[in-house]
Image (tube, rainbow, N blue to C red):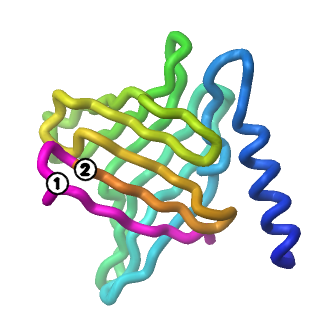
Amino acid sequence: MNKYSQYFVFLLIILTSCSADGPELPLWLDGEWKTNNKSGFVGENWVVENDTLIMGQGLVHVGGQLKAMEEISIFISKGQIYYGAKVADQNEGKQILFKATLIAPGHLVFENPEHDFPTRIVYKLKDPVTLEVNISGRDEEDTRTIELNKR
């Protein structure tokens, strides 16, 4: 795919993420997103289940072993978009919900000020194959940003 085709697809993704009927899921998240590090990679895999649910996993690959760090989802409930995260050894294995506070083409912000960490999760599609994910807490030192590439 040449450069112009990629940007046409990117524009199409942005335009189709807008709806006058209410929020729509960020279908542009669908697929494998990864970044390499010294010992392997970190990433997220997302699968669109239906028009109200996207399921995913936060993954880490270290020392030749692939491990799911968390089960994640983005879903619509009662006209609102939510992000859910479940980490097996945290929060008694219960899903923690974050409510969407900003929904824009290629940009989502989810917040839960009551949660210890993170309190804010931001997804920003920089181009058709580059996704920036930012998680932050109550203190500025708690901010982490990672750039993932679509595979």
Q: Give the residue furthest to the bottom.
A: 38
Q: Which mark is residue 136?
A: 2
Q: Give the residue furthest to the top.
A: 78
Judge from the rendering whether residue 23 lies leftward or rightward of residue 81; answer left or right: right
Q: Amino acid at mark 2?
A: Ser
Q: Nearer the viewer, residue 115 or 30?
A: 115
User: How many numbered discs?
Assistant: 2
Q: Which region is colored magenta?
A: 137-151
Instruction: Report crowding for label 1: few under 14, some 14 to 19, many 20 or more residues within 10 A (C-alpha).
Output: few
Residue 62, compared with residue 130, is above or below; it is below
Quarter holding the C terminus is: bottom right
Q: Position of residue 3 (x, y in %)?
A: 82, 76
Q: Given this view, does label 1 or label 2 mark the residue nearer the observer?
A: 1
Taking the magenta stretch, the answer to whether it contains residue 150 is yes
Q: Which mark is residue 140?
A: 1
Judge from the rendering whether residue 34 lies leftward or rightward of residue 95; answer left or right: right
**What kind of element bears circle 1?**
helix
| Quarter where residue 20 is shown | top right
Q: Position of residue 137 (x, y in %)?
A: 19, 46
Q: Nearer the viewer, residue 140 or 23?
A: 140
Q: Nearer the viewer, residue 130 or 43?
A: 130
**What kind of element bears circle 2?**
strand
Q: Position of residue 115 (x, y in %)?
A: 17, 33
Q: Amino acid at mark 1?
A: Glu
Taking the magenta stretch, the answer to whether it contains residue 75 is no
Q: Nearer the viewer, residue 77 or 104?
A: 104
